[in-house]
Each structure stands twice: as structure tokens, then as C-alpha cells.
Amino acid sequence: MAFRNLFRNKRRSFLTSLSLLVAGFVVVVLHGYVTGFLKGMKENIINWMSGHIIIAKEEYFSRKFFVPQEEYLENPYLIKEKLKEFKYVSFYTERLKSMGIIFKKDINKPVLIFGIDSEKERRILEIDRKIVSGTYDLKEGVLLGKELSKSLDLNIGDTVVIISKTVLGGLNGIKMKVNGIVNVGFSEFDKKVVIISISNMRRLLKMPEGVHEILVFLKDENKIKDFKKNFKLNGITARDYVQELGSFSYYFKLANNIYYFIYILIIILATFTVINTMTVAVFERLREIGTLKALGMRDLEIFLLFGIEGTILGTFGGIIGAFFGWFVNIFLNFKGINMESAVRGMSIAVPYVIRPTANFYVVIFAIFLITVICSIVSMIPAFYAKRLTPQETLREI
């Protein structure tokens, strides 16, 4: 009988299911966007700034804001041997960092200089896939952030002079060719990063051996506390990415909470939309309830009839809307949502391209949410009509 009622008024059933479909779609798609946005920020922070764990001298951390070139790890081999004891370490890479100035004739800009192992960093930074023009060749040249190259009007093959403080306290400069221009993926680094090889960085800093930082990437992020607890070397400190963010971690957590608060508000709005749609659809049928009561149908039977109808509508609309949203998230994860023009001026690690996540558990949650709400709301008129006689119900419009 419930199925017959649904197909008896196809227009009403279609419009009701459509509103439920939209609600399920919005819940799934918005969750994918929010988690994709936050995941992109987190990946930028971990890959470019800290890894899951960053290892350096205690003195280096205490003055890291000033990028103290002289506080470097003279013998990183001891740390590499220590890392072999941790089976959950997936990968590590060494980096040198320095603040400096880049010159092109009379124009100069302050820059952040990254000295990297180009082969190792293919796995982490994927710079070779982000090259806008030129090549991923650091042997005799440098890579510049896209925005930095624009501000200096630099092109492939141009020569620049890079000046930095050395580990000895003086200044040194090297002349390098621009071999590539890279779209880093977020504004903070795109406007100031210069990437060179570790060997050329040592030449610039007049450093014989050693590195400033060793970034460690774990197979399981939940092992961070265990790693920090068991990693012990004199004068050397291991910090996780949350510590490395410092006061910015507060804003990162706040952004996380704000986005999830907005997501909860959207769920509440979707819930009210479902409630409103179902209530209107069912209260229009009070005269029908009166007819059923006059024909002898008991209150419990009417209650179950409307509950089953609501469950069918909720399940049908929820399944189609949630799965449609899931497939949209899969597509957008592959394609990406380019937000570069909107976030270019931000000084935090907001990604240019947001890739929404496609979480199947959210699909199940959306279907369950829509179905349960519809089932409950569709029973409200039955409760209301329960206290009315058939004559009173027939008079209700």
C-alpha cells in the first residue's frame, strides 16, 4: 500500500525525493570539500616545512625564525643510523635553508633558499611535476617560484646572483642560471622560494658537510609520539609538525573547527529542509488519513503506513543524492578545483588547487541521516491525527 501511495501521486513523490536528493548531495560534497581543503593545507605544511618529524640542533630550533645557517648538523650519519631502528619510518630527506637576496641587475628581492637532494625530493615535493617552464635540473642552475620570477621579470636562461650569510658569519654570493620556474602550489612559497642543489647550497654557505634539517616521514602518523619518546641524541631535537607551526597551529586548528562548524550548520539546514518538505507533503494528506480511519484502519496501521512511505522516499532520495555527491567528489579529486586567483595573496599554506576527498563512510552517513529523518517526520501527522476523529480529520485542509 505504501508503494501504491507513492506512485499514486507521482509529482509529489518526485518533488519530495528531489529535495532529499539535494540534501544528501550537499552533505557529501561539502564534507569532501572541507576535508580536501584542510588536507591540502596539512600536506603543504608537512611536505614543504616540517615532515611528520623534523630533526635539527636545539639551537637551530631556538632561533629558527632567523634561519641560523651556522647551527647545522655536522654529522648527519649518526642520525641516519638511528632512524634505521624505527620500522615505521617510511622516508627521510635532508635540507639546507637560508634567507638571502636575489639580484637581477638593479632589482632585488628577499628570498628563502632551499638546498635539496633533487632525486629524493621527487617523492616528497614532486617539483618535477610542478615545473611551469624549463627543466628540473639543479646541477648548474636554480628553480624559482612562479610569482617570484614574475616579480623580477625572470625567464629561463637568465642569470641571477644569490647572496646569503655564510656559516662563518660573512656574506657570500653565487651566480646561477634560471633553469626552471615552478608553481609551488601555495602563495607563501611561490612568492619567495629559490630551490638549488645541496652541493651548490654548501658552496653558497661555505659549509664543508652537514645539513640544517632532516625531515622524517612516517608510515603511520599516530607513531609521532612514540618516535619522539624514543629518539634520543645529545644536543639534537625531534619536533613534530604541530610544534613546528608554533602559534600558527592555533589558527590551523581554529580553521579546522570553523570549517567543521560550517559543515554541521549545513547538515542542520539540510535536516530542516527535509523536515519541512516531508511535513508539508504529509500534512496535505490529513483528509486521506481521515478517509482511512473512516474505513476502519487503526492508528498503528496508519502510523506504520506513513513511516514506511517516508523510509522509502528517504532511502531512495538519500542513496541517489549521496552517491551522486560521492562521484562528483571523485571527479573533483582527479580534476581539482583551482582557487589560485582567490588565495594568491594569502601568507599561509592554502593550496591553489583543492581536491575534495571521496569518503564512502560519509555516503553511508548521509543515507542514514536522510532516511531516519524522513521516517520520523513522516510519522508526525499520524501522531497528530491519532487524537482526531474521522470527521475532524476529513475537515482538516
Image (cartoon, grey):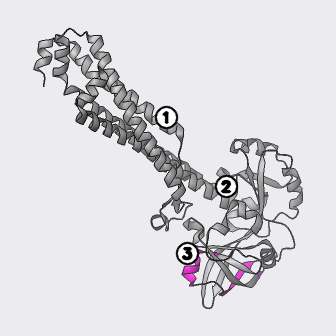
Name the one closer to the observer, 138 or 160: 138
In which image quadrant can residue 58 be found? bottom right
Locate residue 344, reporting x and y percent.
Answer: 50, 68
User: Foreground residue, 52 or 280?
Assistant: 280
For the residue marked with disc 1, what is the amino acid?
A: Ile
Q: CA distance from mark 1 to mark 3?
A: 43 Å
Q: Can you give x and y, in whole percent of width and height, for residue 236 in the image?
A: 82, 55
Q: Is residue 78 left or right of residue 55?
A: right
Q: Position of residue 247 (x, y in %)?
A: 59, 54
Q: Mark 3 highlights which residue?
A: 147
Q: Amino acid at mark 3?
A: Glu
- Give how far across and how far down residue 37 sits, in percent: 52, 53
The disc placed on residue 364 is 1
What segment carries the magenta color? 144-171
Residue 270 or 228: which is nearer the viewer? Answer: 270
Question: Against 379, is 241 above or below?
Answer: below
Judged left or right of residue 357, residue 236 is right
**Mark 2 to mark 3 CA distance (whole Å):** 25 Å
In the image, taking residue 269 as reference, residue 91 lies left or right, namely right
- For the N terminus, the image quarter is top left
Would you say the residues marked 2 and 1 are in contact, meaning their CB atoms lie under 8 Å apart?
A: no
Depicted 51 relative to depicted 258: above or below: below
At 57% from the left edge and 83% from the top edge, which residue is drawn?
A: 152
- Measuring 73% from the left and 64% from the top, which residue is drawn there? 121
Secondary structure under the numbered disc 2 in the rendered image: helix
Q: SS at mark 1?
A: helix
Q: Is residue 217 magenta?
A: no
